[in-house]
Image (cartoon, grey):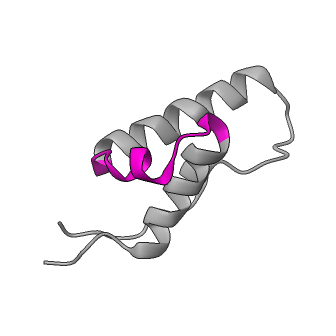
Amino acid sequence: MRLYPEDELYREMSFISYYFHWSEDDVLKLEHRQRRKWCSEISSINANLNPSKEKKEKSILDMKPLSFNG
């Protein structure tokens, strides 16, 4: 069994904390699926608020996912 990649965890935590101003403890309490869902929701909000043909900011969810066997 492989653990969730540390870099990916920090990326998700930073993304959520930056936009929602949640504490590290609050974000760490979320399960993996919940963190991914919040990242998706934040990305969707950003895309709807800032529609553009040219993407200025890449969403965390647009990045190539790391393989994870958990």
In this rendering, position of residue 57 left or right of residue 45: right
Task: Tell me what residue is drawn at x 50 percent, y 65 percent.
Answer: 10
Q: Provide residue 69's location: percent of width, then percent of height.
A: 20, 70
What segment is highlighted magenta in the picture? 19-32
Q: Is residue 42 depicted above or below 17 in this figure?
A: above
- Quarter placement of the N terminus: bottom left
In this rendering, position of residue 32 left or right of residue 41: left
Q: Is residue 63 depicted above or below 16 in this figure?
A: below
- The residue at the far left in this view is 1
Please identify the quarter of the rendering in which residue 26 is found. top left
Q: Provide residue 38's location: percent of width, then percent of height.
A: 46, 36
- The residue at the far bottom in this view is 2
In this rendering, position of residue 61 left or right of residue 66: right
- Quarter placement of the C terminus: bottom left
Please identify the quarter of the rendering in which residue 4 is found. bottom left
**Number of callouts:** 0
Q: Provide residue 18's location: percent of width, then percent of height.
A: 66, 46
Question: For residue 15: magenta?
Answer: no
Task: Tell me what residue is drawn at x 71 percent, y 29 percent.
Answer: 47
Q: Provide residue 28's location: percent of width, then percent of height.
A: 37, 53
Question: For residue 23: magenta?
Answer: yes
Task: Tell me what residue is drawn at x 85 percent, y 31 percent.
Answer: 52
Please identify the quarter of the rendering in which residue 66 is found. bottom left
In the image shown, does 14 or 25 lie closer to the viewer?
A: 25
- The residue at the far top in this view is 48
Task: Tell me what residue is drawn at x 28 percent, y 69 percent.
Answer: 68
